[in-house]
Amino acid sequence: MKKAKPLAALLSAVVLVGSLLTGCGSGERMMFGTGGTAGTYYAYGGIIAQYIRNYAGIKVTAVSTGGSKVNIQSIQDGDFQLGFTQSDVMAYAWEGTKSFEKDGPTHDFRVLGGLYAETVQLITMDENIKTVADLKGKSVSIGEAGSGVYFNAIDVLTGAGLSLDDIKPQYQSFGDSKEALKDGKIQAAFIVAGAPTTAITELATTNGVYLVNIDGELRDGILDACPYYAPLEIPAGTYPKQDEPVETITVKATVIVSAALPEETVYNMTAAIFDHTDEITAENAKGAELTLENATEGMAAPFHPGAAKYYAEHGVTVESLGEEG
């Protein structure tokens, strides 16, 4: 078990004291790890927290974090009770691979449900870059070191027969990638987020941008090697001046919860989200992807029994595992 960081430990203590004072049921308090304040995780997490408060009677606070890996580790440490993660990073955590190879596997979390597609988008302003193979010798942003984007980029490059030695890798955030493309410091960038992504829309509007297809044998090979991906088409018109659809792959933005949470609590949290999809969609366009299919398919870790109970009542059977399982 990792030692909790001082600030996280303080937050955890505040949550614990609040729970002791207010008791169970409607008095429960939870911390929800999301992502950076400029990203979809944070904004959408605030809405999800609101619906859990309103319909499950649980006082959830959505907090900004470093994203997927941090959220998983904070649940492991007991500082957060739920959090967002990419489905692929969740698989790494459960299996102890890639970004969790050094730390080892963690089984302190369970799946509540998948919410929306996080699309692997390879963008460039160089019209001569038409395929992933064309990245050879180019300066390419592949996300911050150890991030989910980084490992998505590695999977795509590997599928195309390229290694980091074949490109000039740059480890940049979405915002930095956008500015570096505008300034000609890089020739391409991987961005993994729900489409349309603000950084790409801004770049397409002001400077023009091309999206590179990840399709055909390349995509088939990635899907065979990495089952946490799924195929996805970005429709024409998703971005300014994007006249043709773009083929690519996607992982899933997923809500995970502590394995220690009671079944009834997680059941009520799941219902608070999926019984109110129309209302959530009215507040955030990503709500349109809240379906039982999206919630339950492509998960490489087991569901919490409370979530599994909700899905079973709606005709979907998923693999679940209790805290002692």
Image: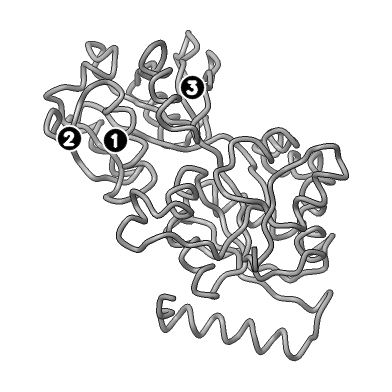
Mark 3 burial class by Cα count in 10 Å: few <14, some 14-19, many 20+ = many
Where residue 186 appears, as percent x and y from the top left, is: 19, 32
Mark 3 = which residue? 239
Identity of the residue drawn at 27% across and 28% down: 158
Q: Is residue 254 above or below residue 137?
A: below
Mark 1 burial class by Cα count in 10 Å: few <14, some 14-19, many 20+ = some
Quarter of the rendering containing residue 63 = bottom right
Work out how far the residue at label 3 is from the one at label 1, CA to CA, in angstroms: 25 Å
Where residue 300 appears, as percent x and y from the top left, is: 55, 44
Left or right of residue 97, residue 194 in this image: right
User: Which numbered disc flags the more N-terminal residue, 3 or 1?
Assistant: 1
Identify the coloring. Answer: one colour
Three-letter amino acid code at the position of disc 3? Tyr
For label 2, the SS is: helix
Left or right of residue 209, residue 252 in this image: right
- In this rendering, which labeled residue sits more in front, label 3 or label 2? 2
- In this rendering, which labeled residue sits more in front, label 3 or label 1? 1
Mark 1 = which residue? 154
Work out how far the residue at label 2 is from the one at label 1, CA to CA, in angstroms: 8 Å
Quarter of the rendering containing residue 79 = bottom right
Identity of the residue drawn at 35% across and 26% down: 122
Q: How many marks?
A: 3
Mark 3 and mark 2 residues within 8 Å of each other at the beta carbon = no
Where residue 313 appears, as percent x and y from the top left, is: 88, 45
Work out how far the residue at label 3 is from the one at label 2, CA to CA, in angstroms: 29 Å
Residue 164: mark: 2
Along the line of sight, the residue nearer the viewer: 149 or 261: 261
Quarter of the picture holding the C terminus: bottom right
Quarter of the picture holding the N terminus: bottom left
From this viewpoint, which residue is outermost toward the front?
325
Where residue 141 appears, as percent x and y from the top left, is: 25, 37
Mark 2 burial class by Cα count in 10 Å: few <14, some 14-19, many 20+ = some
